[in-house]
Image (tube, rainbow, N blue to C red):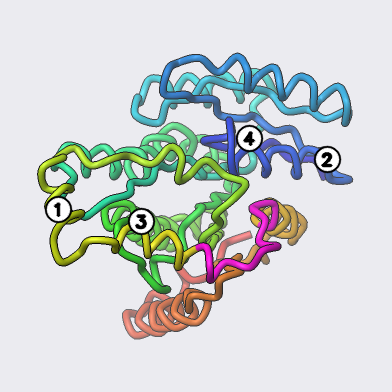
Amino acid sequence: MSQVYLITGASTGFGALAARALATTKEKHIIFAGMYSHNGDTRRYEKDIAAFNKEKDADIRPVSLDLLNQDSCNSAVKHVLESTGGKLDVVIHNAGHMNYGPAESFTADQYMRLYDVNVVGAHRLNQAVLPHMRKQRSGHLIWISSSSVYGGKSPMLGAYFAAKAAMDSLAQSYARELNLWGIETTIVVPGVFTKGTNHFEDAMHPGLLGVAKEYEEGPTKGVAEQTMAGTAGVVPEDADPSLVADALVVVSQAPRGKKPYRVSVDPAEDGSREGGAIVDRFGVDFHRRLGLEGLLKVSV
C-alpha cells in the first residue's frame, strides 16, 4: 500500500537516494523531500527531482524544511497533511552534519550547532508530527544513526560522533514511549561511506585555527591524513550509499507491527552490528526487570 513519507535532508546523499528508491517501488510511495541548503538556494535539487519524477513517473514533492527552526518544521508538516488529506505515515530523520578535525579545535558554539542539526532538529520535527501520529494511533519513525555509536570510532570526528550517539539514545527513548501509541521505530545504522555522499566535502572545519595548527605540527602530526587514508582502506571498493536506500525499501515492505528495530548497513564491518545487538538486548532485559515489558512491542 502506498504511504506518505517525509524525509529530512533529502537534497543530497542518503536522503536523496532514499527518496528516489522509495518513490519507485511497486507501492509508489508519495515522498515529501525536505529541502535545505546552507546558502538558502535549493532550486537545483528541485529541478533534479522534477526531472526524476518525469522520467520514472514518481511522486517526490520538495518541501522547505529547516530543522533549526520550529516554525519551519510546523509549516512543513502542515503542508504535508494539507496536501494529502491528513495522511503522513513515515518520517525519516536523515538530516545531519559532520565535522573533521581535532575535538579540541572546535568551539563550544560549533558543538552546539552539530547537536542542534543532528539531535535537536529531529526532536523539533517530532513535536510537529507526533500529535498527528498519536491521534491516528499509527506511524513509523526511522532514524538514520551511525555505526560509530556502537562500533569503531576514528579520530577527528569527535563532535559528530558524540551528536550521533545522542541521536541514537534519543531514538531509543522515543521508541519505548511511542510503542503503546501504535508508532513504530526503526534505527538504521550506516557505516562509513567514502564516496557517493557529501559528508566529507560539507564537513564543518575547526573554529580554533591555532589549536588545529598545534595538532598538525605536534606529536599528532599526520593523524588526520592517516585517518582519511586508513578509512579509505577499510571501506570496500563496491561500498555504495545506495545500500542504505535499499535497506529502507526493505524496511518499508515489512508489515505493520513487525518493522525491524535496528538495521545495520556497514560494509566496513566496524563492530557496530554486534555492539548494537548487545546494547539493545540489555535494554530489553532492563525494561523487563522494571516491569515495563509492555513498552517493548508496538501496539497494533
Q: Secondary structure at mark 2?
A: loop
Per the model, the C-alpha gap separating discs 4 and 2 is 18 Å
Magenta residues span 232-243
Please name the residue shown 50% across and 82% down the image.
274
Q: Which amino acid type is marked by label 2?
A: Thr
Please name the residue shown 40% across and 31% down the image.
67
Q: Nearer the viewer, residue 46 or 198?
A: 198
Q: Nearer the viewer, residue 212 or 17?
A: 212
User: Circle 1 is placed at which residue position?
Assistant: 104
Q: Is residue 264 visible?
A: no
User: Circle 4 is placed at which residue position?
Assistant: 88
Which disc, if any, is residue 24? Answer: 2
Q: Nearer the viewer, mark 3 or mark 4?
A: 3
Q: Which amino acid type is marked by label 4?
A: Leu
Per the model, the C-alpha gap separating discs 3 and 2 is 31 Å
User: Which of the two labelled residues, at mark 3 and mark 4, occupies the earlier sequence position?
Assistant: 4
Mark 3 vs 1: CB contact within 8 A: no
Please name the residue shown 55% across and 60% down the image.
190
Per the model, the C-alpha gap separating discs 2 and 1 is 44 Å
User: Which of the two labelled residues, at mark 4 and mark 2, occupies the earlier sequence position?
Assistant: 2
Q: Is 25 on the left-hand or right-hand side of 192? A: right
Q: Nearer the viewer, mark 1 or mark 4?
A: 1
Q: Secondary structure at mark 4?
A: loop
User: Which of the two labelled residues, at mark 1 and mark 4, occupies the earlier sequence position?
Assistant: 4
Which disc, if any, is residue 170? Answer: 3
Q: Nearer the viewer, mark 3 or mark 1?
A: 1
Q: Secondary structure at mark 3?
A: helix
Mark 2 vs 1: CB contact within 8 A: no
Q: Is 13 on the left-hand or right-hand side of 57? A: left
Per the model, the C-alpha gap separating discs 3 and 4 is 22 Å
Circle 4: is it few (<14), some (14-19), or many (20+) Cα within 10 Å? many
User: Which of the two labelled residues, at mark 2 and mark 1, occupies the earlier sequence position?
Assistant: 2
